[in-house]
Image (cartoon, helix red, strand yellow):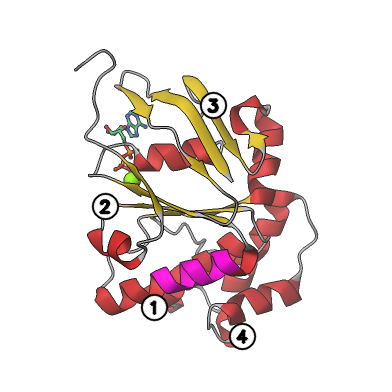
Amino acid sequence: MIETRDLRYAYPRGDTLRLGDVSVAQGGTLLLRGPSGSGKSTWLALAAGLLTPLAGEIVVAGQSVAALPAAARDAWRARHVGFLPQKLHLSEALTVGDNLALAYFAAGLPVDRPAIASALAMLGLSEAIASRRPSQLSGGQAQRVALARAVLLRPRVFLADEPTASLDDGACAMALSLLQQCATTLQATLVIATHDARVAQALPQAQVLGFRAAVAEGAA
Ligand code: ADP
Ligand code: MG
């Protein structure tokens, strides 16, 4: 589940973003919709505890995120939040398998190679992919590897930032169905930040939090 109340965020020397309240049940889907620069990625960073709100509260899977001290927040995020960033951030210094193994190091857990193999299989990737480098993958394969990394530790909440931005219609439909399949399998709450109208069309049952072009604090 995710609940927010009176959430606000201010970048240094930037505008204050006021973010609408949401209440999403565990296993539900939330779309963050709005134009570029309206605060969607900021909202995801607040939910993941990567940023601290100026005011208000965000509760994710029963945890008030900002209430956690920094080190505990990192451990909590590694254990309970699956993040599919817009830029995939796969390390070229590591094989695909070791990129996935990093999720265990971040969470302070022993590496579970069979779980890595089954996460890759769940996303339709062959076992041979595990020994490749990220540059030896197609764009679609790289996104699936990043998706596998995000779901590996069976997170309670799964955050995806513009997962369809550069995809054609077929790949867009496939990516959305994989995201939903992963969330359903894990009974995770799924949040998708998107300015892509195809996503709302494909997920008519999702709750929507609308974002508008940034408005300064106190402005009309
Ligand atoms: P979106 O994901 O909807 O495109 P963002 O959350 O990335 O929007 O950005 C929201 C607003 O915050 C924008 O006005 C953007 O310019 C501003 N912003 C984003 N990152 C920073 C930063 N590190 N410092 C200052 N302002 C930022
Ligand atoms: Mg963004």
Q: Residue at x 31, y 59 (%)?
A: 200
Look at label 3 and name its amino acid. Answer: Glu
Pick whichever, 171 or 14, lies toward us: 171
Where residue 22 appears, as percent x and y from the top left, is 46, 38
| Number of on-image labels | 4
- Mark 2 / mark 3, whichever is N-terminal: 3
Bounds of the magenta span? 176-184
Where residue 78 appears, as percent x and y from the top left, is 65, 48
Q: Residue furthest right?
A: 110
Gap in Å between the C-alphas at discs 2 and 3? 25 Å
Where residue 45 appears, as percent x and y from the top left, is 47, 39
Indicate the secondary structure of the residue bearing disc 4: helix
Q: Residue furthest left?
A: 220
Image quarter for residue 165? bottom left
Q: Which residue is mark 2?
A: 195
Above or below 136: residue 143: above
Q: Nearer the viewer, mark 2 or mark 4?
A: 2
Type of secondary structure dominating the magenta stretch: helix
